[in-house]
Image (spheres, helix red, strand yellow):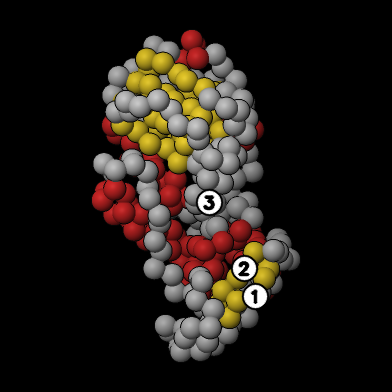
Amino acid sequence: MPELPEVEVTRLSFAERIRGARVNAVRVGKPLRWPLGQTPERIVGETVGAVSRRGKYLWVALERGGLLMHLGMSGSLSFGPIAGEPGPHDHFDLVTTRGTLRLTDPRRFGAVVWSPAADADPAARLLAGLGLEPFDARFDGAYLHAALRRRRVAVKSALLGGAIVVGAGNIYACEALWEAEIDPRTRSDRISRPRADALAEAVRSTLARAVELGGSTLRNYRNAEGTAGAFQLKAKVYGRAGKPCVRCGTTIRRVVQGARATFFCPGCQRR
Ligand SMILES: [Zn+2]
């Protein structure tokens, strides 16, 4: 499932190249999670502006309105010269003077939704309720501490929810909690301010590193599929059950929290 770093890497892969391109055609394939909500004719002739990201959504600005895109469970976006006919899983093409932005999505949980503006419906409704961006200056220890105190759930679940900060998906939440030496099962309202400071920093640095690693993968594969390729996080705890912690040597444990696998070190991650 594409997480925030993969979506950001995808954005970086085409944002500059598509900016200023003119839309020649719009092809809509099989139904996605939500309908486009606009006729292709209305989009043809528009010039593409900036491509921005909010959570796992991309906003492709057009002159009048824009397209809000989501990769769902299995989607990927490619941008480049596309000669062949769309394959069975290619469900949306934005054909421009500089190449085709194509959404490939086998499971079709992804979406492309036209909206008159990013802060108007339907985009605004879809983006409502998202927490702060991890790289937003307002996302700091004070903010995180206050937000965690208002909840009484395991700290990992609070992060996963996305209402406090976006981007801390399962892998990244596990990694950030290891980095901050916090047991994922700790009740969120019992996290002290210094530990919240450490956790905010860990969330930010984990995601920044993931974008960086994904970016280097992308540069290598840009000419092949045009997709980000498999993101390879050099995980410290995620997926390492039974192996020694690289910080203290204790055996990494796997538990299930809210139907999601949690990996942590019982030696150096404290409640
Ligand atoms: Zn450890």
- The residue wearing badge 2 is 261
- The residue wearing badge 3 is 1
Where is residue 53 shown, x and y percent of the image?
45, 40
- Mark 2 and mark 1 lie on one chain; the one further toward the N terminus is 1
- The residue wearing badge 1 is 255
- Mark 2 and mark 3 lie on one chain; the one further toward the N terminus is 3
Q: Residues within 10 Å of mark 1 (few under 14, many from 20)?
A: few
What residue lies at 58% left-to-right and 80% top-to-bottom?
253
Asked if residue 253 lies left or right of residue 234, the reply is right
Decide: marks 2, 1 in contact (CB < 8 A)?
A: yes
> Is 30 rendered above or below residue 171?
above
Secondary structure, mark 1, is strand
> Is 245 rendered above or below residue 11?
below
User: Is residue 172 something that shows in the picture?
Assistant: yes
Q: Nearer the viewer, residue 7 or 162?
A: 7
Instruction: Estimate the spatial distance between the alpha carbons at disc 2 and disc 1, rounded to whole Å.
Output: 6 Å
Q: Amino acid at mark 2?
A: Ala
Secondary structure, mark 2, is strand
Instruction: Estimate the spatial distance between the alpha carbons at disc 2 and disc 3, rounded to whole Å.
Output: 15 Å
